[in-house]
Amino acid sequence: MTLESLPGSSGYLDSFPERRMSYFSNPYVLGLTVIAGIGGLLFGYDTGVISGALLYIKDDFEVVNQSSFLQETIVSMALVGAIVGAASGGWINDAYGRKKATLLADVVFTAGAIVMAVAPDPYVLILGRLLVGLGVGIASVTAPVYIAEASPSEVRGGLVSTNVLMITGGQFLSYLVNLAFTEVRGTWRWMLGVSAVPAVIQFFFMLCLPESPRWLFMKNQQDKAIAVLSKIYDIARLEDEVDHLSAAQEEERQKKRTVRYLDVFKTKEIRLAFLAGAGLQAFQQFTGINTVMYYSPTIVQMAGFNSNQLALLLSLIVAGMNAAGTIVGIYLIDHVGRKKLALSSLSGVIASLVILAWSFFAESSGSSNEIYGWLAVIGLALYIAFFSPGMGPVPWTVNSEIYPERYRGICGGMSATVNWISNLIVAQTFLTVAKAVGTGATFLIIAGIAVLAVVFVIVFVPETKGLTFVEVEQIWKERAWGSGYNIESLLEQGNDS
């Protein structure tokens, strides 16, 4: 079987155009994607809700109001949990499956939400944030891989990006909830506690969903895998997909060994793949997205809008643009491609950050002109408009498809851990850096990082639009060893490098 004849490859789909699938052609796959994507909703809701809740936590706890460090810790403790959850999530996924990993994430997240809602002091609240982070970390690894492994290659980018839409949708929902509870007694407790609802909903829906078909094949449960695949493909393509997976499984069995974390760095093509995947995840955070989402109400207040409710309302608009932009990204990622989308996204991000920096420089110079406050809000909105279709979905989509089967869980977990560590660094330092050098200078620093991200994408990230997992693996082998190298012996010889 040649690369051109692999099920889902461009050559295969050109030969059998009637077997090509579209985003909406199979309600089963779309339903599976949405349910798995509730993990993304939890991710996004937690990211967004804490920004509004923090305004009211400061009102309830004077010690929090007087300490920027404690404010940053409340935000970032969820990220500490997410780092642990993501680091262990790859192993949990490979050992116990994508379904059980999702169920575990839901249980831990729900427990954390309850602890936050009843917290009598900031320190119990921080414990609840840690538990929520553990759940979010596991879910952030699991959902993209689960969706990718059940997706036809020609719509894989759009379907995995749906998980990112759920993240941005969760952020938008969190701002709606924040606004809804601004006049309710126990404001922030409701904001944080209600996050248990989607976790409980996903738990019960996931009980009705199957395990990933590729994971089932990997665990020699072919009958169950075929039963799942039969709901995804028509009979003609199903036979080809099963033959391909069976052949791939036999090849994996011949070289089967337990994959450990250090193995990622021993094989040259895996190192290159992990560099691209982890680099994208790091740059997603260091180009400032969660600075905007965590602290957007605070940034709006910095811009001169002092009302909590007005700050939340303007932040709701920003979150709505984030979700709308992701919908655009779902279409573009399988039409324009991952690499071009990331580069165009970063170009707009750089321009938006310069506008933000300029507005804060002007405001700090003592000007009382309200136009600079609105310019900061416009800069935030433009930032989201450029970021959300590109650098929002691209890192998660690329990481769900660039690793070989044996490494997918562990590398996905490691790259997600890089994302959360980067997220933690940004969340823990933004307010401190902004106070030290000024908000305008902080945004200029982020713009400089975005320029570096453009160079990184050009040099290290290949285009994977419409490629099968085998075709993507071939890209890394050619980058590692050259296009004329004997493909069959690459892994064995790569292990000696």
Image (tube, helix red, strand yellow):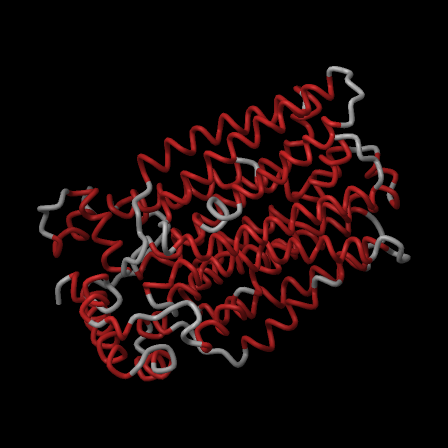
Where residue 177 sits, quadrant-wise, is bottom right
The residue that appears at 15% across and 48% down in the rendered structure is 493
Q: In the rendered view, does 268 fall on the left or right side of 104?
A: left
Q: Locate residue 432, reporting x and y percent.
A: 68, 28
Q: Locate residue 100, reporting x and y percent.
A: 50, 71
Residue farthest to the top, as pictured:
365
Q: In the rendered view, does 409 fall on the left or right side of 289?
A: left
Where residue 362 sits, quadrant-wise, is top right
The residue that appears at 47% across and 44% down in the rendered structure is 391
Where residue 18 sits, quadrant-wise, is bottom left
The residue that appears at 68% across and 65% down in the rendered structure is 110
Quarter of the picture containing the N terminus is bottom left
Quarter of the picture containing the C terminus is top left
Q: Locate residue 145, reporting x and y percent.
A: 42, 61
Residue nearest the viewer, comparing 100 with 238: 238
Examine the rendered structure and indicate whether residue 444 appears above or below residue 159: above
Q: In the rendered view, does 381 fall on the left or right side of 415?
A: right
